[in-house]
Amino acid sequence: MNNRWNKLIYWAGAPFYDVLFNAGPFARARKKVFADLELKPGQRVLMVGVGTGADLRFFCGKKLEITAVDLSPAMLAQAKSKSGEDEQIRFLEMDAQDLRFADKSFDLVIASLILSVVPDEHKCMSELVRVTKERGRIVIFDKFKGGERKMPLMMRILRPLIAVMGTDIGRDYRAILKPHLERLIIREDSSAMFGEMYRKIVLERK
């Protein structure tokens, strides 16, 4: 997995992304993760890896200052098409591992299906924490290695094959969060879909 390959995958997949990942169980999981967030007018929100904008409907119309970033121009074009003309949303092409924002810039950072696709999940997590204000929140929706047990044999066999398609099904969210727990409070850690695989994680920056 690297950014050049991921860009190619996202370019090819952008026209089909919503059919696969914004319908059925994915649509229900997104609603479960984002529909009940406490949002206040004027909050600065960063959507990291906004993709085709599948999550925008939960934030538009709430008088927020939204910045949406993605590595893929094709994905950003799809996301822009979902935003109303009256919405104040900045769409920027940007690497989630190198966010070009000042420290403590955002009240809320949304990381939806991004930690499992970036080449370096630890660098990405460090950036998410860095740009979040004190008492701000980070909301993660993603797939991870479930529980403390080893991955099933079939998943271990499939992992490198699936990685070719731009996603890693075997990353351990506990290991990703561990270096940052002195600066974070885990407010929620719950299943979002498919048992322990897809999770909703809400973090508060100390």
Image (cartoon, rainbow, N blue to C red):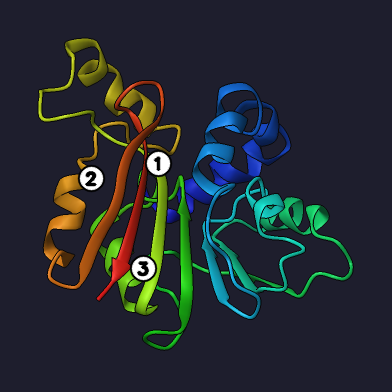
Residue that badge 2 annotates: 173
User: In terms of secondary structure, where does tag 3 sit?
Assistant: helix
Residue that badge 1 annotates: 142
How far apart are labels 1 and 3 at the CA level? 14 Å
Mark 1 or mark 3, earlier in chain: 3
Residue 112 lies, with reference to residue 151, above or below; the image says below
User: In terms of secondary structure, where does tag 2 sit?
Assistant: helix
Mark 1 or mark 2, earlier in chain: 1
Q: Residue at x 27, y 69 (%)?
A: 126
Q: Are marks 1 and 2 in contact (CB under 8 Å)?
A: yes
Q: Quadrant of residue 152?
A: top left
In the rendering, at what x and y percent does residue 59 appear?
66, 59
As rendered, which of 118 and 45 lies closer to the eye? 45
Question: How many residues crowd mark 2 within 10 Å: few (<14), some (14–19), many (20+)?
Answer: many
How far apart are labels 1 and 2 at the CA level? 9 Å
In the rendering, at what x and y percent does residue 123 appear?
27, 64
Identified by mark 1, the residue type is Asp
User: In terms of secondary structure, where does tag 1 sit?
Assistant: strand
Q: In which quadrant is the N terminus drawn? A: top left
Question: How many residues crowd mark 1 within 10 Å: few (<14), some (14–19), many (20+)?
Answer: many
In the rendering, at what x and y percent does residue 101 appear?
46, 83
Q: In which quadrant is the C terminus drawn? A: bottom left
Residue that badge 3 annotates: 128
Instruction: Answer with left or right where residue 111 lies relative to residue 143.
Output: right
Identified by mark 3, the residue type is Leu
